[in-house]
Amino acid sequence: MSETNSQPPIYLINLDKCTERLNNCTSRLNEQNLTLTRLSAVYGSDLSEAAKQKHYSTPLNHEQYHHALSDCEIGCYLSHRKAWEKIASGDAPYGIVLEDDIKLVGDLNLAIDTLNNLPIDWDVIKLSAYKDRQRKEAFSVKVSHEFNLTVHTKPMTGCAASAITKEAAKKLLQSSESFGRPVDVDIQHFWETGVNVLSLLPYPVAQDLSYQSTIADRKVEKSGRFWHRKRQQLTSYFLNKKAVAQQVANLKKAVDQIQP
């Protein structure tokens, strides 16, 4: 990817009823001379049980997660699968996926220029934090005057804004043919999907916290799976720690190979 000022496809996940959000996002991107392609979000509550179970697996959910996914979480996952399908079937080497509760806090064109000219292979690069949260960095390298490419100690939660390569989209579709966790949690389990997750800092996109999420409200439920959750967290902690260490080693090696 060595082109400058070449806009990749930008897909905005947006519910049909949320026209104000669509207008706001369109206006915000237009201010930076960027265009978007709207994808009609899946409204989970409107789905039949058969439609929900096409990809959402109740047995897998019991195995992998600490509560049943809400209709919003199922709809959110299916919406992101629609975006991945677009990227996987398209001609561009990567695409950007946005949820409709975002605002631009940096120059997205400069971020795109940086992505277009990255001299290393990558899969998914987060362009936004979850709400206003921060996460400890495991490794960071400067890749342009404006941005660092960063490995966090655990991939950032949320899917407000991400760049996803064509090959990564194919892998995510394959790994989520049957899913039991929220979409952002599955992406965090990158050692399972084979899709590495990095961040471009400082993030050029942020969530507009004046909005309430319409597709991905995280369900808080006393589900009776307390110890199941603790076992999951402990297992994931060690698997994530090992995978992040390998990810850092791989990125350092790639950087060393391109530096004079």
Image (spheres, helix red, strand yellow):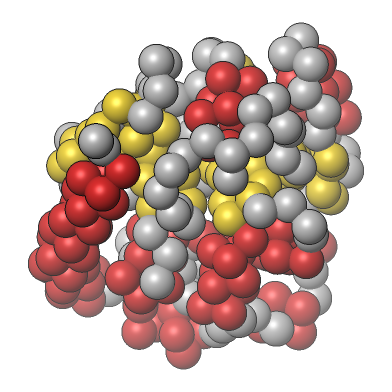
Residue 232: image x %, image y %? 22, 72
The C terminus, quarter of image: top left
Give the number of callouts: 0
The N terminus, quarter of image: top right
Of the pair 92 and 29, the residue shown nearer to us: 92
Q: Is residue 95 above or below residue 81?
A: above
Q: What is the quadrant of residue 60 in the picture?
A: bottom left
Of the pair 74 and 221, the residue shown nearer to us: 74
Tell me which residue sits at (58%, 66%) in the image: 167
Of the pair 215 and 82, the residue shown nearer to us: 82
Q: What is the quadrant of residue 190 in the picture?
A: bottom left
The reply to whether residue 223 is in sight is: no
In the figure, is residue 64 to the left or right of 216? left
Residue 220: image x %, image y %? 40, 52
Residue 196: image x %, image y %? 38, 59
Q: Is residue 92 above or below residue 110?
A: below
Tell me which residue sits at (27%, 73%) in the image: 225
In the figure, is residue 117 to the left or right of 49? left
Tell me which residue sits at (58%, 15%) in the image: 107
Of the pair 252 and 64, the residue shown nearer to us: 252
Tell me which residue sits at (41%, 16%) in the image: 146
Residue 172: image x %, image y %? 55, 69
The reply to whether residue 177 is in sight is: yes
- Residue situated furthest front in the rendering: 260
Q: Is residue 53 above or below residue 126?
A: below
- Residue situated furthest bottom in the rendering: 59
Q: Is residue 226 above or below residue 124?
A: below
